[in-house]
Image (tube, coloured by chain):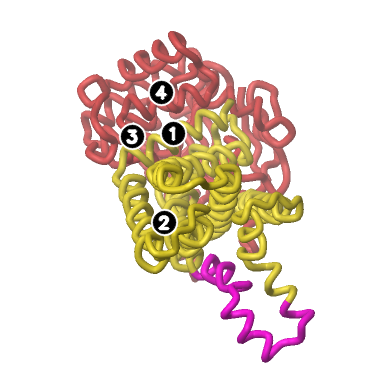
Amino acid sequence: MIEVENLTKQFGTKRAVDNLTFTVQKGEVLGFLGPNGAGKSTTMRMITGFIPPTSGDAKVCGISITDNPGEAKTKIGYLPESAPLYNDMTVIGFLKFCAAIRGLKDTAKNDAVERAIDTCFLDTVAKQSIDTLSKGYRHRTCLAQALLHDPEVLILDEPTDGLDPNQKFEVRQLIKRLGKTKAILFSTHILEEVEAACTRAVIVDRGKIVADGTPAELLAQSGTGSLTDLFRKVTTRDTEAAA
Amino acid sequence: MSSCTIYKRELSSYFSQPTAYAIIVIFLLFSLGLTFTFGEFMRVGDSSLEWTFLFWHPWVYMLLAPAVGMKLWADEQRTGTIELLGTFPVSTWSAIVGKFLAAATVWLIALALTFPIIITVNYLGNPDNGAIFAGYLGSFLVCATFLAITMLVSACTRDQVVCLIVSVAICVLVVLCGYDPVTRELSKIVSPGVLEGIVSFGVWDHFRSLNSGLFRLKDFIWFGSIILVCLLGTSAILSSKRA
């Protein structure tokens, strides 16, 4: 479903993503881990077609994002890192706009919006203006936007960031549920999330994959049974990178 | 299709916020206020509106048109919604066109609301309504040109205030180039060839002929090419920012 082939991104002299190759199959939830600045968001932005790769390619449902971006983008639902929204709209107005821009019309559009509102528990705020929403609701509104067109591929950049423990739990459950029928790639800093929601995880550091496996395999690889230990072992710390 | 969806969103955003109302009211106050004061509408007894009313439009637009256009891309970049737009299956170009047309529509509404002055001159005298229409068309094209300039500037920055100041500065320059008192002074310093170049860059040469009821192809080409160049420039800047 998602095939990333030798994806590279160079910003000036800095190589943010370095020859990355991995795949995510249907029914798989891939956790994308790594320290800040490891290239997680950049990779996701390239797969979603927001920024062009320096070299390499990403295919979504077999469609290349560099050769045929228009078509590939219809297959993807994307939650950007900061959950950006149009603050001057209401939740329902925003979702209707997103559905319309995805080519949904009339009843199909209204049904999709209603379904997304249900899935993300937005009923109580549906008619509220977005600039009055709390962070949790903002995140879920942006997540709802990614689900509208029932995409085969979901790319979620830190979907649980800034949520309270209850909301985190709900989003993880949602990811798990959706992961049964879709290919999901989601990035996180929270290592427990890997065990809670992922079928597989990769750890990237300075643009390269440094560990790849199921949660159980990664735990075994750590030697101590702790993902935190593995994470610290395979990634570079800020202080080291600077030195 | 997607241009149309973006157009609707932008237009409703103008009218769901105080922006459009404030600008329309200020435009009406200024344009009509200048007509009855410095334009000496009552004393001159000219029903053509050329010097009493339409003459003032570029002066008002150079300050107010950027206020309508400044948010178009600056706000998208500041709030990060550009990342949503960039991953929707829409081309940058259709987003640019949709946004530009929405801002132009705000001004079309503002211009349409000056209709009492047309009723007044038709009641008091016997004007050439064809020439008045040409004047209005010229006025709208001046405004659209300023909007296109503002859009180009707004693609360069995420700060609306910077966008406003820079766009106003450019628009003031375009208005002053070719304004008779300025060209008279300039003619003392620069050679006639250079002066001609400066005048043709200014708005008056093209606006004045339309305002006097003259349809010259070269004026339409001037307005059309500046608008097109600015919109293409916007597209180039937005793409290069992502690369």
Q: Which mark is residue B67?
A: 2
Chain B drawing hue: yellow
The residue tagged 1 is B9
* Residue at image location 51% in from the left, 51% down from the top: A38
Residues under labels 2 and 3: Cα distance? Answer: 20 Å
**Callout 4–callout 2 Cβ contact below 8 Å:** no
Distance, label 2 to label 1, CA atoms, is 18 Å
C-alpha distance separating marks 3 and 4: 10 Å
- Position in image of residue B225 (x %, y %): 71, 53
Q: Which marked residue is nearer to the observer: mark 3 or mark 1?
A: 1
Q: What x and y, as percent, mark residue B156?
A: 54, 59
Q: To which residue does mark 3 refer?
A: A89
Q: Are marks 4 and 2 on the same chain?
A: no
The answer to whether residue A5 is left or right of residue B132 is right
| Shade representing chain A | red
- The residue that label 4 is drawn on is A96
Q: For the magenta stretch, what is the residue range?
A: B169-195
Dots 3 and 1 on the same chain: no
- Specify the amino acid type for callout 3: Met
First along the sequence among labels 2 and 1: 1
Q: Nearer the viewer, residue B156 or A8?
A: B156
In percent of the image, x 46 and y 10: which residue is there?
A108
Q: Tell which tag, 4 or 2, sits nearer the viewer.
A: 2
Task: State left or right for residue A220 relative to residue A54.
Answer: left
